[in-house]
Image (cartoon, rainbow, N blue to C red):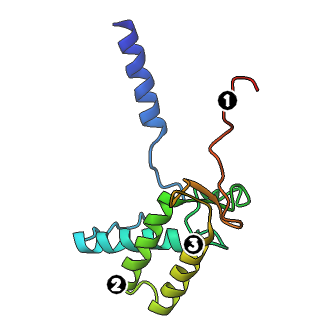
Amino acid sequence: MKCLVKSLIIFQFFLVSCSCSNKSGDAPEEVIPLTDEQLLDKVQQDAFKYFWDYAESNSKLARERYHTDETWVDVNLVTTGGSGFGLMTILVGIERNFIDRTDAVNRLTTALNFLENADRFHGAWSHWIDGNTGKVIPFGTKDNGGD
């Protein structure tokens, strides 16, 4: 029981300390609810924008991750799984008029030319690829029993 009371007090402390008070004194912004269609448009456009704006610069494929505070980290590390999503967002972007068809075709051509020359194993690409060289980036070092 004692533990429950302590937990409730701690929970209440966090609840009160995380209030959303408006310290600037300005009137709070009115939140306008979106229709289902508007929400879907926003989600599709933002997904497209992410894969378009943050693609690796040479291959135009999706980066494994993007560090907003350390943009040089993993700057050329592309992921094939994420790139599949990114390529599909381009097709949606064309259909939804988020991007000009010519720009989309240029981007797709660059990505597909890169993949044509990237390392493959029995026709399959590795999960991680160096966006500059097309060489495999391994997950880690293989343990060879101390060799």
Q: Is there a contact, CB below 8 Å, between mark 2 and mark 1?
A: no
> Can you tell which quarter of the image residue 40 is in?
bottom left
Q: Is residue 99 above or below residue 10?
A: below
Callout 3: few (<14), some (14-19), or many (20+) C-alpha neighbours within 10 Å? few
- Distance between the alpha carbons at the discs numbered 3 and 1: 31 Å
- Distance between the alpha carbons at the discs numbered 3 and 2: 26 Å
Of the 4 image quadrants, the one containing the N terminus is top left
In this orientation, does residue 96 appear?
Answer: no
Which residue is found at the position 37% from the left and 71% from the top? 44
Which residue is found at the position 74% from the left and 59% from the top? 72
Q: Is residue 94 above or below residue 34?
A: below
Residue 54 left/right relative to 14? right
Residue designated by label 2 = 95
- Distance between the alpha carbons at the discs numbered 2 and 1: 48 Å
> Can you tell which quarter of the image residue 144 is in?
top right
Q: Earlier in the sequence, mark 2 or mark 1?
A: 2
Amino acid found under the numbered disc labelled 1 = Asp
Amino acid found under the numbered disc labelled 3 = Glu
Q: Nearer the viewer, residue 94 or 16?
A: 94
Which residue is found at the position 24% from the left and 74% from the top? 37
Residue designated by label 1 = 143
Per the image, label 3 sits on a secondary structure element best described as helix
Residue designated by label 3 = 116
